[in-house]
Image (cartoon, grey):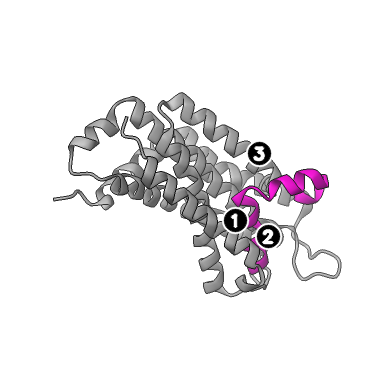
Amino acid sequence: MKIPFIAVSKSEFILYLREPSAFFFTLIFPLLLMLLFASMIGNDPFPEEEFGYVDFSVAAYMGMVMVTSFVMALATSMAAYREKGILKRFRAAPVTPFSILAGQLVAIFAVTVAGVILLLIAGFVFYDLKFFGNFFEFVFVFLLSSASIAALGFIPASLAPTARSGEVIANIMYFPMLFLSGAALPQSMLPDLLKNISLAFPLTHAIRLMQGVWLGGHFWDYPVHVMVLAGFILAGLFVSVKYFKWE
């Protein structure tokens, strides 16, 4: 009888919360960064607009939570399990690659949702955060964006042989996305060349899609972003299922 991925999810969630650096950079750092910039800029509506800085930027900070959890945490934890032989021992147990990857995904998604909830609470309480879109549409694009970033994180998680190599690959993926996608810095500050380069990252499309729907648009107004994110999901799943390494 196969061990359900729910059991893996529970144990991974507990282990994640016990890791101080992962806890801080996923749940606390995006919140502190949002509060820092909001304290300087405020959330008064921009000229000729109904929304202010926090209304516009909260989706970007959600993206920061996503990429920190799904790329950094997923890649390094799975690579560490592989290096220590934990995955090899899993192979002898009634655990499939799907159970392991799905368990990791569910646990990290729960942490991601917790980080997003903290952002929303702070935004609503301190800066009168306003939502202009359709709730169900935003949930859909949030799930689509999360799945796309998770699929990207699955690639090094499935292939990296050691914790160090997983961390290196994760950093190579993480920092360009963080600074070029609009998560840490507004894309308006970037030259056109870097803006074009950022289009290769799923996080760029995720943030633009979530911002658009948050501010009152509809997901079908952004077909390119939706298709790119869906494409990354398929690519990540293909690599993970086909090339997953136990050791």
Q: CA distance from mark 1 to mark 3?
A: 27 Å
Which residue is depicted at the point 64% across and 56% down?
205
Mark closest to the chain's N terminus, 2 or 1:
1
Numbered mark located on residue 127 in the image? 2
**Residue 15 placement: quadrant:** top left
Evaluate whether residue 223 shows in this view.
yes
Give me the residue at 72% from left, 45% from top. 197
- The stretch of residues the image draws in magenta is 186-213
148 inside magenta stretch: no
Does the magenta portion include 209? yes
* Helix, strand or loop status at disc 2: helix
Check disc 3 and report the residue beneath it. Answer: 176
Q: In the rendered image, is residue 130 in sight?
A: no
Residue 104 vs 84, above or below: the answer is below
**Mark toward the viewer: 1 or 3:** 3
- In space, the residues marked 2 and 1 are separated at their CA atoms by 7 Å
> How far across and down, in percent of the image, does residue 177 sit?
64, 43
Q: Name the side, left or right, on which 81 lies relative to 183.
A: left
Residue 25 x %, y %: 54, 39
**Residue type for callout 2:** Tyr
Q: Which residue is mark 1?
A: 122
Residue 165 located left or right of residue 182? left
Mark-to-mark CA distance, 2 and 3: 29 Å
